[in-house]
Amino acid sequence: MPVEVLGDLSRGWYGGRLHDDWRPSSPETKQALLREVGLDGPFWKLV
Amino acid sequence: MTTQAREFAWRLRSWLYRHARDAGRLPTRSELAEGLGASASGVDRALRFLAESAVVALDGAGEILMAHPFSGVATPFRVRTPLGDYWANCAWDAIAIPLLLETDGRCDTRCPNSGAHIDLAVTGGRVEPAGAVIRLPVPVRRFWDDIGFT
């Protein structure tokens, strides 16, 4: 995966972890994050 | 697990991430107990809950091995930032740490396949080197089957 894409994914995947109200994202939310940065297909399938 | 115990676990999670950011390393169980004014058994119960929730990974002694993107042990991925230096679990996490901390960062490491030197960097939110590729060893659905391998 290109590092630029990984950077885009990281912002959503890891963002907010320093906030007190952070909770794990649902699989559906993570799937949407992957799709938003163009990561689709069987390898990236969560739900 | 009671609602109160869950709330404590989430409070512990926040505390450990702030500790990681400020101290440059993950806290020990005893540091968590002291910092939160909690019992050792309460800390261990909270850590087990967080591990079952795929929020942290624990080692055999129950200490925090990973709180992504931070690593509790030395790895080939040392991230240097203006805020401090941090151990990352992998190349992805080496990028994620500066982005999480909203700062610049660099990680001099090597490609695990070719051994070639690679200087991962985040500068002003831009990830470098442009065109570099990171390989993920397992499909995303199996990330937590063996998080140490992933």
Image (tube, coloured by chain):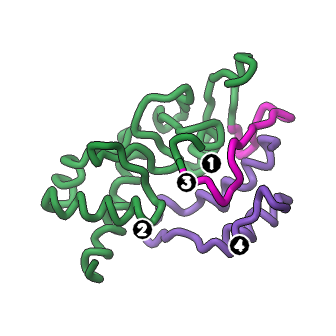
Chain colours: A purple, B green
Q: Amino acid at mark 3?
A: Asp
- The residue carrying mark 4 is A47
Q: Residue at x 48, y 44 (%)?
A: B70
| Circles 3 and 1 on the same chain | yes
Same chain shared by disc 1 and disc 2: no
Residue A45, picture quadrant: bottom right
Task: Tell me which label, 3 or 1, sits earlier in the chain.
Answer: 1
Of the two numbered discs 1 and 4 in the rendering, the one whose residue sits closer to the viewer: 4
Q: Which residues are magenta?
A: B122-145
Identify the residue position indicated by label 2 in the image.
Answer: A20
In the image, residue B72 above or below residue B101: above
| Quadrant including the N terminus of chain B | bottom left
Q: Residue at x 74, y 48 (%)?
A: A6
In the image as oriented, which residue stretches furthest toward the bottom? B3
Three-letter amino acid code of the residue under disc 4: Val
Horizontal side of residue A28 vs B88, given as left or right: right
Q: How many other residues sit within 10 Å of disc 2, few (<14), some (14-19) or many (≥20)?
A: some
**Comes first in the chain, label 2 or label 4:** 2
Q: Is residue B133 magenta?
A: yes
Q: Which residue corresponds to mark 1?
A: B99
Alpha-carbon span between mark 3 and mark 1: 26 Å
- To the question of a shared chain for discs 3 and 4, the answer is no
Badge 3: residue crowd in 10 Å (few <14, some 14–19, many ≥20):
few
Asked whether the residues under marks 1 and 4 belong to the same chain, the reply is: no
Tag 1: amino acid? Leu
Q: Give the residue type that dot 2 points to.
A: Asp
Q: How many marks?
A: 4
Per the image, label 1 sits on a secondary structure element best described as helix
